[in-house]
Image (cartoon, rainbow, N blue to C red):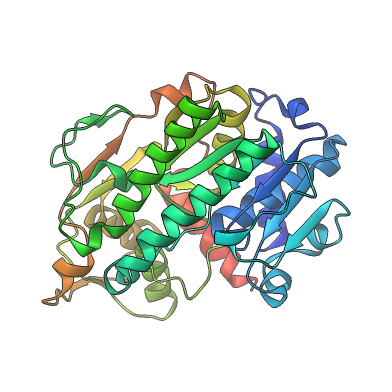
C-alpha cells in the first residue's frame, strides 16, 4: 500500500470517537484471509492502533505463503513484535497454543467465474472452514466474526431498502452461480446455531463490494476494470446492460464498521455494511467515472456474451439498509468518486 494514503486513512480512523478503542487493550485476533483486501486492511489498522494507543494487541494471521505475506504488508506490520503468521490450511487449522479473543473469518473465493467452474469446492470451502473455526471459537471461548456478503439477499428487483430481516427473494438453489451465496447463507445459519446451542458469541457482517487502497492492479472486479481501462487509454467495456444496483464501501470505512460492531454490537446478530449514499447501477457508476474522473475521455461500450447469464447474477437491486449499524454511531466517510481517486492514486505508487 502507498504509505501516504494508508497513513491518511488510519489517521482518519483514529478520529472516529464513537469507537471505544480502549476495549482492544490486550486483545488477541485470529484472522483468516489475511493477505486479501479486507484482511490486510484490518491488520494494518490493528497494528496502527496498537502502536499509537499502546494497546498491546496480539494478531495471529493465516496466510498461504511467506512470499505473499512479504508482498502484502508494509514494514510497520512485518516489524510489529505481536504479529504471528500461520502458513496452514484453514480447513484443518486448530492451533490451541494461543488464546484468541476474536476469530475473524474473512477468507473466501471472490471471482464469479470460480463460483460457476468450481461450485462444489466453493460450497465445501465455505462450510468446512467455518465449521472448523467455530469449533475453535467454542473451545477457546472466543468471539466469532463471520464476513458474509450482500449476495445472501439473492436478486431483489425493486429499490426498496433491505434490512437484515429481508427474506423476499432468496437465491436460486438450482443455479451453479449460487454456490457462493448459498455457501454464505448456510455459514450464517451455522454461526447462529453455535450461538444458540453452545453460546459462542457470533457476529455476521454482510458487506457490500468494498474497494480503495490495497486493491491489486490485476483485480478483475468491475471497479478495477473501469480504472484500468482509463489508465490504459481504453474504453470501459460492460459485459451486461449494467442495470444491477448496489451500494459500495471504502476500505477504511469497512474497518471502522468491523470495529464498531465487535465492540458495540449485539452478539448473535447480522449487520449490513455499506455506504448507502453510493447506491447506483453499474451503468450509472460507469457514467460517473467517465464524466468526473476522466473528463469524458473514457467511453462506455458493451460486449454481452452468451455465457454472461451463467457467470453473472441476474439484474438485481440490493439497496442495503444500514440503520442498525448507524445506531451504533458508525458513519461512512468516503463517497464513490473519492474511492476511485484514492485507489488509482495508490496504484501510481506501486
Q: Position of residue 99 (x, y in %)?
A: 77, 41
Please give the name of the residue rendered at 70% of the width and 77% of the height, measured from the top-left corner: 67
Please give the name of the residue rendered at 48% of the width and 76% of the height, measured from the top-left corner: 218
Q: How many labels does the image show?
A: 0
Q: Is residue 248 visible?
A: no
Using the rendered view, name the quadrant where residue 89 is placed: bottom right
Please give the name of the residue rendered at 73% of the width and 72% of the height, measured from the top-left corner: 70
Q: Is residue 309 above or below residue 19?
A: below
Q: Is residue 206 above or below residue 122?
A: above
Quarter of the image that includes the C terminus: bottom right
Q: Where is residue 93 in the image (x, y as percent from the top left)?
A: 63, 58
Indicate left or right for 130 with 20 as reference. Answer: left
Near-viewer residue (137 or 202): 137
Please give the name of the residue rendered at 68% of the width and 63% of the height, measured from the top-left corner: 2
Q: Where is residue 238 in the image (x, y as percent from the top left)?
A: 23, 69
Q: Where is residue 313 in the image (x, y as percent from the top left)?
A: 21, 58
Indicate left or right for 138 with 233 as reference. Answer: right
Quarter of the image that includes the N terminus: bottom right
Using the rendered view, name the quadrant where residue 112 is placed: bottom left
Pick out the residue farthest to the left: 306
Indicate left or right for 178 with 35 as reference. Answer: left
Near-viewer residue (317 or 336): 317
Near-viewer residue (321 or 191): 191
Indicate left or right for 103 with 112 as reference. Answer: right
Q: Is residue 140 visible?
A: yes
Amino acid at each position: 500500500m502507498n504509505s501516504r494514503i494508508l497513513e491518511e486513512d488510519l489517521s482518519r480512523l483514529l478520529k472516529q470517537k464513537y469507537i471505544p478503542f480502549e476495549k482492544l487493550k490486550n486483545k488477541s485476533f485470529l484472522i483468516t484471509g489475511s493477505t486479501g483486501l479486507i484482511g490486510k486492511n484490518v491488520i494494518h489498522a490493528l497494528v496502527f492502533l496498537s502502536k499509537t494507543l499502546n494497546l498491546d494487541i496480539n494478531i495471529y494471521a493465516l496466510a498461504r505463503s511467506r512470499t505473499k505475506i512479504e508482498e502484502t504488508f508494509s514494514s510497520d506490520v512485518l516489524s510489529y513484535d505481536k504479529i504471528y503468521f500461520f502458513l496452514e490450511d484453514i480447513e484443518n487449522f486448530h492451533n490451541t497454543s494461543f488464546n484468541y479473543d476474536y476469530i475473524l473469518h474473512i477468507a473466501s473465493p471472490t471471482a464469479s467465474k470460480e463460483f460457476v467452474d468450481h461450485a462444489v469446492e466453493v460450497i465445501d470451502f465455505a462450510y468446512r472452514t467455518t465449521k472448523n473455526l467455530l469449533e475453535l471459537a467454542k473451545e477457546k471461548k472466543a468471539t466469532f466474526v463471520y464476513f458474509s456478503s450482500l449476495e445472501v439477499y439473492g436478486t431483489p428487483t425493486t429499490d426498496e431498502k433491505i434490512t437484515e430481516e429481508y427474506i423476499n427473494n432468496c437465491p436460486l438453489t438450482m443455479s451453479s452461480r449460487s454456490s457462493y451465496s448459498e455457501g454464505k447463507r448456510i455459514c450464517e445459519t451455522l454461526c447462529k446455531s453455535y450461538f444458540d446451542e453452545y453460546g459462542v458469541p457470533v457476529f455476521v457482517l454482510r458487506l457490500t463490494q468494498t474497494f480503495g487502497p490495497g486493491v491489486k492492479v490485476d483485480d478483475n472486479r468491475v471497479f478495477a476494470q473501469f480504472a484500468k481501462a482509463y489508465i490504459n487509454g481504453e474504453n470501459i467495456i460492460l459485459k451486461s446492460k449494467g442495470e444491477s444496483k448496489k451500494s459500495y464501501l471504502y476500505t477504511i470505512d469497512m474497518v471502522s464498521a468491523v470495529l464498531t460492531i465487535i465492540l458495540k454490537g449485539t452478539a448473535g446478530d447480522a449487520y449490513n455494511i455499506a455506504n448507502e449514499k453510493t447506491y447506483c447501477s453499474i451503468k450509472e457508476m460507469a457514467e460517473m467515472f467517465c464524466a468526473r474522473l476522466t473528463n469524458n475521455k473514457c467511453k462506455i461500450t458493451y460486449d454481452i456474451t452468451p455465457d454472461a447469464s451463467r457467470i453473472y447474477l441476474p439484474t438485481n437491486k440490493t439497496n442495503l439498509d444500514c440503520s442498525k449499524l448507524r445506531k451504533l454511531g458508525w458513519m461512512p466517510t468516503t463517497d464513490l468518486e473519492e474511492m476511485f481517486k484514492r485507489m488509482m492514486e495508490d496504484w501510481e505508487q506501486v
